Amino acid sequence: MTAESIYQKTYFITTFGCQMNAHDSEKLAGILNGMGYRPAEDEHAADLVVYNTCCIRENAENRVLGNLGYLKHIKKKHPNKLVAVGGCMPQQDGAAKRLAATGAVDILFGTFNLHRFGELLERRVVTGETVSEVWEKPNGLDDGYMNAFRENPYRSGVNIMYGCDNFCSYCVVPKVRGRERSRRPEDIIAEIETLVSGGVKDITLLGQNVNSYGQKPEPTGVDFPSLLNLVARLEPAPKRLRFMTSHPKDLSPALIRTIAENDNVCKHIHLPVQSGSSRVLELMNRKYTREGYMSLITALREAIPGIAITTDIIIGFPGETEEDFADTLRLVREARFNGAFTFLYSKRSGTKAAEMPGQVPKDIANERFQRLLDAVNPIVLERGKEQENRTLHVLAEKEEDGVFTGRADNNALVHFKCGGQESPLGKIVPVKITQAKTFFLLGEGEAAQ
Ligand code: SAH
Ligand code: SF4
Ligand code: F3S
């Protein structure tokens, strides 16, 4: 095969992880488009299948390994199909070996050398040999601005920092994404200006803990609230600004003010609590207490009426007692979250928690998990019902059979019909909410202007 022959080929990328991972997939798509590849309809049709992997929990890894087993089988019939595997999983000790053992992987790369993907692919195509390159650390090169290709032309993530220094005792992210490092504010602003002038309406500033932006490796001179303010007031300004994720320990009054004072900063915050027990929070190394968390919720709701608050909760952390779990249930009822991602604790090798005593038996954890869902879901539905008969402003992002879908300012997922001649796609449409379901809202849109 010659290098030229790659130029009509197609690719299909599957993202297994978080928003950061999803944004990395957009960068990979940008690299591939730049090489003349085109997106395929699905994995079956693609000449090149890319898995952007996640290892936050064991089931994320199992999904990847299961899919690779299937691809190995497909490759028997289609020997020219290439499979590339990147992202967080290859950064884990031993994982590269397990991935290679599937016999399905042609190109293996990690989080720190994503920008090298084009070269690795070419090397595979030219030599016909398996290529594996996984760096142990970033080598200072991960800030190279990469032209991302977004399937959704209206929304984009923008990295403001990489890595994480928090070392929550259960978490692999510091290991697989490296030390915390903030991008320079001028680079972030330049990227956002390009996106806004290209028609992107909704921008999410991305980092594992955006609230500690601007400190490492050297101070950038701009902290997170100041950065958010700067970006919100650009001219032309992004129509909508979001950010993910906020660590409660670093959420400052200045950030609360900044959200309140800028109309284009969305009235939503994702604030993972992880547990309602201060004892467990300490074991998790989260550096806040249940009371501290609840006072943040109060401060946010007082300063920003109507703000939607969503969270992450882990069940079955080592040493979690029935009493600790009851504290989590109580917190969920007090905080009345608009949404919660709930996870069963997953033991990750190399983390502190993996060595902790009192690993919770699976059946107990499963039972608590179910009780947690039974507590969370009715509250989320009640929160949704509070939106009924209200008008939310929704960015219409997709259309299927005459039904449009998008996110409201408060991050609610809304499906709506819309009258009028002109398509509302890409526009922010007032939508009257007619019915709340647990995970989405239904509504009627006003005709697009
Ligand atoms: N940086 C973000 C979270 C990134 S991971 C933050 O600190 O909030 C997303 C979520 O996965 C976490 O909030 C946590 O709830 C969950 N998670 C991380 N490691 C986990 C593990 N070992 N088992 C179960 N859930 C985990
Ligand atoms: Fe993981 Fe904690 Fe960092 Fe989030 S803040 S990525 S949970 S170590
Ligand atoms: Fe998963 Fe990596 Fe994100 S481990 S959650 S894809 S940073």
Image (tube, rainbow, N blue to C red):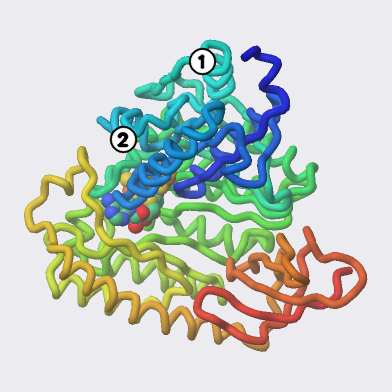
Q: Residue furthest right?
A: 421
Figure quadrant of the N terminus: top right
Residue 231 at x, y percent in the picture: 66, 46
Q: Which amino acid type corresponds to the residue marked 2 in the rendered image?
A: Lys
- Is the residue marked by circle 1 packed among few (<14), some (14-19), or many (20+) residues within 10 Å? few
Q: Nearer the viewer, residue 116 or 68?
A: 68
The residues bearing labels 2 and 1 have C-alpha atoms spaced at a distance of 32 Å
**Label 2–label 1 contact, CB within 8 A:** no
**On the rendered structure, is 100 left or right of 429?**
left
Identify which residue is drawn at 35% across, 34% down: 102
Say which residue label 1 marks. 128
Say which residue label 2 marks. 175
- Give the answer, above or below, for where 126 lies relative to 160: above
Q: Nearer the viewer, residue 393 or 448?
A: 448
- Give the answer, above or below, for where 212 lies relative to 402: above
Q: Which mark is residue 163?
A: none
Residue 434 at x, y percent in the picture: 67, 86
Q: Which amino acid type corresponds to the residue marked 1 in the rendered image?
A: Gly
Figure quadrant of the C terminus: bottom right
Residue 424, picture quadrant? bottom right
User: What count of labels does the image hold?
Assistant: 2
**On the rendered structure, is 267 left or right of 178?**
right
**On the rendered structure, is 58 left or right of 300?**
left
Let me know if residue 179 appears in the view.
no
Residue 28 at x, y percent in the picture: 58, 33
Q: Nearer the viewer, residue 241 or 17?
A: 17
Residue 184, picture quadrant? top right
Q: Earlier in the sequence, mark 2 or mark 1?
A: 1
Q: Residue furthest left?
A: 357
Task: Give SS at disc 1.
Answer: loop
